[in-house]
Amino acid sequence: MYDGETRALALAAVVAGESLNSISKRLGVSRATLRDWRDRPGAANLPTDCPRCSNGHLPHGPYAHLLGLYLGDGCLSNLKKAVYSLRIACDDSYPRLIDEAAEAIAAVHPTRPVHRVQAAGYTSVVSYWKHWPCLFPQHGAGPKHLRRIELADWQVDIVAMCPELFLRGLFNADGCRVANWTTQMVGGVLKRYEYPRYMFSNESADIMGLCQWALDLLAVPWRMPRRNALSVARQAGVARLDEFIGPKS
């Protein structure tokens, strides 16, 4: 498959009168593809085009979900010929979440297969594309908690539109819904009470800040029992998160 920039260069060369054979040799595009582009000039937007540097479409909901997964358990790796692999590491204990990660990737980049690579105790959901760094400018050398993590303005806009899906990705990657308990004296008798709460853990203060911001957008109260752990325990907050996150299994 070819990106939008290559297509544009080829069509410009056709208009300028360059032969298909010459364009094919120069750009590495087959003559059959060049003839198709020449004869169907109205098909300008390819599904493989990058949403950031070309004419591709970026579905906001799936991207917000995938961004949360990437910040939690994802990474990009530079391979040969400027191709990058996007990998989301998913615990094998939660096959539904593995399916969700694969669905999110497929929705963002629908024209290429999504692979599942088995490892010890987890499955890497993998996709290959030259333009993954365009969609995840947070990519860089070293662990995320040792470098600055900031959202670009266009990412901020998407998360502000879809905070629920962004939080679903974060909590599915680095969070959980657990049963907490406390004791209270009632009529002279010590009674134990259980209640659900959500926990989110991440060593990156920047990613933690993004989680706090998204919760604030939804007016979900939270607190920090530790510097790297966030808790949502109030009944109304838990009920709100139950609407779009819920237990992992």
Image (cartoon, grey):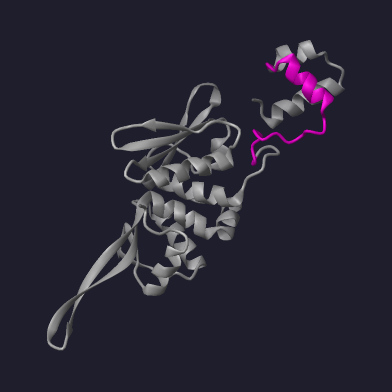
Rendered view: 91 above or below 43: below
Position of residue 120 in the picture relative to residue 36 (left or right): left
Residue at x 35% of width, y 52% of height: 249
State the image coordinates of residue 94 (x, y, percent, origin top left). Answer: 35, 46
Quarter-wise, where is residue 146 in the image? top left
Residue at x 29% of width, y 70% of height: 195
Rendered view: 133 above or below 97: above
Q: Residue furthest bottom?
A: 187
User: Can the viewer see residue 137 in this picture?
Assistant: no
User: Can the viewer see residue 26 in this picture?
Assistant: yes
Image quadrant where one finds the N terminus: top right
State the image coordinates of residue 12 (x, y, percent, origin top left). Answer: 81, 25
Q: Based on the picture, tell me whether residue 115 belongs to the magenta stretch.
A: no
Residue at x 70% of width, y 31% of height: 4
State the image coordinates of residue 153 (x, y, percent, origin top left). Answer: 59, 53
Total number of numbered discs in the rendering: 0
Q: Based on the picture, tell me whether residue 42 belongs to the magenta stretch.
A: yes
Position of residue 155 in the picture relative to residue 39 (left or right): left
Position of residue 36 in the picture relative to residue 66 (left or right): right
Q: Report the span colored magenta.
A: 28-52
Residue at x 53% of width, y 27% of height: 83
Quarter-wise, where is residue 24 in the image? top right
Q: Which of 211 and 46 is in front in this view?
A: 46
Q: Nearer the viewer, residue 175 or 155?
A: 175
Q: Which of 45 and 243 is in front in this view?
A: 243
State the image coordinates of residue 102 (x, y, percent, origin top left). Answer: 48, 40
| Chief SS of the magenta region | loop
